Image: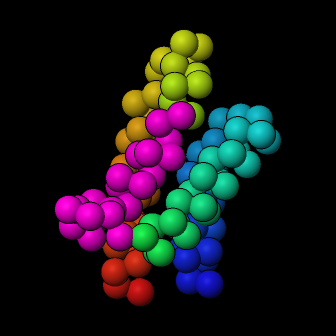
Amino acid sequence: MLSLCVGAVAGALDVIPMVARRLSFRSCLSAFCTYLFAAVIIFYSDLPYLPWWADGMAVTLMMALPVVLTFAGKERKAAPVVLFNALLFGLLIAVAERFL
């Protein structure tokens, strides 16, 4: 239950700037679901050879990579932002898992 709450908060934090830029509903829903499901995966997995803080970053980076590859040809400026958000929110989710 805590993983869903953390994922919902992370997803909402990612969607807020997207709504402000008037992106499509489909894009916002995709970003929200990505972080919602990433939080559940992070909470219930333990990647070998990685410290606790890198688990979240690795999982969200792996989940964001197909999205980046999908629009890499059309919107190249968005790729670094999506990857940075994946690393940042992955770290925040891992910190929430560790300390909540």
User: Residue at coordinates 34% horizontally, 80% vertically from top-left?
Assistant: 98
Question: Residue 58, position in %: x, y?
Answer: 35, 52
- Considering the image in quadrants, where does the N terminus appear? bottom right
Question: Residue 51, position in %: x, y?
Answer: 21, 67
Q: Is 93 on the left-hand or right-hand side of 53?
A: right
Q: Is 42 on the left-hand or right-hand side of 50?
A: right
Judged from this view, the residue extending furthest toward the top is: 73
Question: Residue 14, position in %: x, y?
Answer: 56, 52
Judged from this view, the residue extending furthest toward the front is: 48
Q: Is residue 78 magenta?
A: no
Judged from this view, the residue extending furthest toward the right is: 25
User: Residue at coordinates 27% horizontally, 70% vertically from top-left?
Assistant: 52
Q: Please name whichever residue, 99 or 1, is drawn nearer the observer in this view of the structure.
A: 1
Give the colour scheme shown: rainbow
User: Residue at coordinates 40% horizontally, 30% vertically from top-left?
Assistant: 80
Q: Please name whichever residue, 32 or 23, is drawn nearer the observer in this view of the structure.
A: 32
User: Is residue 26 in view?
Assistant: yes
User: Is residue 19 in view?
Assistant: no
Q: Is 76 on the left-hand or right-hand side of 33?
A: left
Picture quadrant of residue 73:
top right
Q: Is residue 51 magenta?
A: yes
Is 40 drawn above or below residue 54 in the view shown? below
- Considering the image in quadrants, where does the C terminus appear? bottom left
Picture quadrant of residue 37:
bottom right
Is 68 drawn above or below residue 41 in the view shown? above
Q: Is 63 on the left-hand or right-hand side of 28?
A: left
Residues shaded magenta: 46-66
Is 13 drawn above or below residue 64 in the view shown? below
Is 22 drawn above or below residue 70 in the view shown? below
Q: Please name whichever residue, 54 or 88, is drawn nearer the observer in this view of the structure.
A: 54
